[in-house]
Amino acid sequence: MRKWMVLLTLSLSMFIIVIDTTVMNVSISALVVDLNTSVTGIQAAISLYALVMASFILIGGKLADVIGKKRTFVLGLAIFGVGTAMASISTSLMMLIIGWSVIEGIGSALMMPNIQTILREAYEDKDRATAYGVISAVGAVGAAMGPIVGGFLTTYYSWRWAFRLEVAIVIVVLVCCRYISTELRQGSRPKFDFIGAALSIFGWSTIVMAVLLGQSYGFWVAKQPFVIGSMELAPLGLSVVPFVFLTGVTLIFVLFSWTAGRDEQGGVAIFRPSVFRTAGLKAGIAVRFIQMAVMAAFLFTMPLLLQLSFEFTAMETGLALIPFSLALLVSALGGARLSAQFSARLIIQTGFLLAIAGLILIAITVSPDAEPSDMATGVVFGAGVGLIASQILNLVLSSVAPDQTAEVSGLNGTFEQLGNSIGVALVGTIMLGTLTTGLQDRVMAYPDLEAEAKVEITQALQNSVELVSSSQLAEAMQDAGASVDQSAVILKAYGEERTQSFKIGVWFLVFLSLLGLIVTRSLPNRKLV
């Protein structure tokens, strides 16, 4: 029994990390009301959480080399607890971002890579395969239970209780950490690559911030000037976004150049680019990136669709996602058992095919006349994602030598969270952009408006459109003094364009999944057991 206490400790840690974001997704509408913010604001908080994790995961892996895996894990757990406690008492979006997105994100980043490396060192052979299967299953259970737990607490109590329960679990895990062995240090303490760490943080942060800024400022042509103090930036009528993105790419290029130079000289680097020479590693990390982008975007999009189009409560949203959640759980557990019969590549490819089929069914089903039960087609998507999740982590980590596990785990975690962050940011931007363009086109086609009025309205819509429910829009129209006939026309137009924006968002996920399927061709064709 004592042997499996390490697995229990790590599983509880994985559970609270995974359930955290899924709880947020079904609580979006409640958060918007309680914190007096918008869907766009909560989207930014969710993306920022994943961004902070992506920026600090490499640091979490390398810090373990300096102070030890157990100490780094416990430090991350404590930071996570502080951030969770702060999130539970948030009174504004900014307070939520500081507590949840930043502090909790840093804690998660210190924990994640060390969960995987401690697990690898604690078990061998069949026990290790079992442990990886359990961790994958726990991740699936967290993803499955998150919408239900979050929906129940948000509807009948408060979304704050989800964070309070996480604090309680953190305390239990801290007590259980005594079962994790403290590694004995041999030789002098390794140095830390502060320059590489800084380049990693600012590089990845800048790239994701560019995606988030594109929503407000345009991805190429400036929707509005970027204001710093009294200075407005819109060079040659262009948005600041491509310049911000180019800055991020440049910093990442410098990061790879810096680490390659340190690696060649035998110095300490935040990671060694030479690990990418391992067969299939680049493809494995790319597949994980795409899988997480699709998964995160789906879990952001579907609760919004259910709550805004069907006016579901958080609890009803969680219940509606049960078919998807159960399919994900069963598929993740079943996929681990298939490892002895089939190659990981074949299982992952099958997963992508199922995910694509499920998303196409959802895209076809979404319409203004759709029923909530139509969203049960998410079961096919869930089964596909579960199959991918059951294989990809083990495939990535088993492709390198034991002494490279911590490093590759950190890299894998970085791209995992980048996928999370970019997936949510992109799908949110696409949906809002589609909604804005659709409403502008309707205004321009409206016969009873003069040309000057059409231009004024379309310009006003450019930066003021938000995703809201029909009841919220009706209330706003009433407050604005609109007539019954005017409200009816606007509500019908908005509802149709909102549905179209969700449909386009799902088709974007189909495209990403097809891209993932293509990348799987470069994965090694071998069994994991």
Image (tube, grey):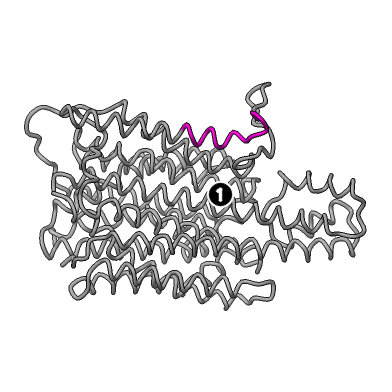
Q: Where is residue 211 in the image (x, y as percent from the top left)?
A: 53, 43
With respect to residue 363, does 170 lie above or below?
above
User: Which amino acid, by three-letter code, is at mark 1?
Assistant: Gln
Residue 9 as seen in the image, left or right of residue 128? right
User: Looking at the rendering, in which quadrant would you find the N terminus?
Assistant: bottom left
Q: Where is residue 106 in the image (x, y as percent from the top left)?
A: 38, 39
Q: How many labels does the image show?
A: 1
Instruction: State the residue in front, 142 or 285.
Output: 285
Residue 440 as seen in the image, left or right of residue 233? right
Magenta stretch: residue 244 in it?
yes
The answer to whether residue 282 of the structure is visible from this angle is yes
**Which SS class for mark 1?**
helix
Point out the stretch of residues depicted in magenta. 234-247
Q: Residue at x 36, y 29 (%)?
A: 198
Residue for badge 1 = 43
Q: Which residue is drawn at 44% across and 63% down?
A: 513
Q: Where is residue 393 in the image (x, y as percent from the top left)?
A: 27, 57
Toward which corner of the image does residue 431 lie, by quadrant?
bottom right
The answer to whether residue 156 of the structure is visible from this angle is no
